[in-house]
């Protein structure tokens, strides 16, 4: 039976200014979003060569572009978008994506609002299988 690799590449706190939100003023003004991406990979094949692993610089650039494009209402949708993108990188077997919205329009004192999704693929060998993880 196939098991997910235990190896992880983690990108934490990637800050993106974008125009997502339910309210018109969120779409007009925009706000900060922080993205955490934890990718299940097998780094044993990397052999100290960047071309044999996930290039986290390219991952960061791709995530920023994905979060900035096409405003949506929900951070759940943003998280799905980033998960799908992440699974498209060769060698990625699973992605745990958290989208933080620290400046959400909530009339109370709070530290953060976030949504986390976990999605599974096959390491770039075929089509991704979407499943909910907790």
Image (tube, helix red, strand yellow):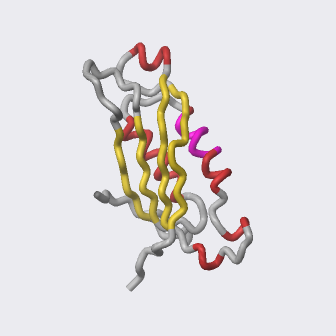
What residue is drawn where x is 44% and y is 39%? 78
Main secondary structure found in the magenta portion: helix
- Left or right side of 94 for 11: right
Which quadrant is the C terminus positioned in?
Answer: bottom left
Residue at the extreme left: 108
What is the x, y in percent for residue 113?
33, 35
Q: Is residue 42 above or below residue 129?
A: below
**Residue at screen point 40% across, 31% down:** 102
**In the depicted structure, whether residue 21 falls above or below residue 9:** above
Highlighted range, magenta:
61-67
Q: Quadrant of residue 91?
A: bottom right
Residue closest to the far bottom: 1
User: Quick check: is 62 in the magenta stretch?
Assistant: yes
Indicate whether residue 44 is drawn in magenta. Answer: no
Please state the horizontal and vertical placement of residue 92, each as a whole percent of the image: 53, 65
Q: Locate residue 129: give its quadrant.
A: bottom left
- In the image shown, does 39 or 81 lie closer to the viewer? 39
Q: Residue 84, percent across and down?
A: 48, 52
Report whether 113 appears left or right of 46: left
Q: Quadrant of the N terminus?
A: bottom left
Q: Answer above or below: position of 14 versus 50.
A: above
Q: Residue 25 in the image: x percent, y percent?
A: 42, 13
Total marks shown come to 0
Residue at position x 34%, y 43% from top? 115
């Amino acid at each position: 039976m196939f098991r997910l690799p235990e190896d992880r590449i983690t990108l934490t706190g990637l800050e993106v200014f974008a125009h997502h939100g339910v309210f018109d003023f969120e779409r007009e003004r925009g706000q900060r979003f922080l993205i955490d991406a934890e990718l299940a990979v097998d780094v044993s094949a990397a052999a100290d060569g960047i071309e044999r692993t996930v290039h986290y610089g390219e991952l960061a650039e791709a995530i920023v572009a994905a979060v900035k494009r096409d405003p949506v209402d929900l951070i759940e949708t943003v998280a799905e978008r980033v998960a799908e993108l992440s699974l498209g990188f060769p060698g990625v077997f699973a992605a745990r994506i958290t989208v933080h919205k620290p400046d959400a329009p909530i009339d109370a004192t709070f530290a953060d609002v976030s949504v986390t999704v976990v999605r599974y693929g096959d390491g770039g060998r075929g089509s991704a299988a979407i499943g909910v993880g907790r």
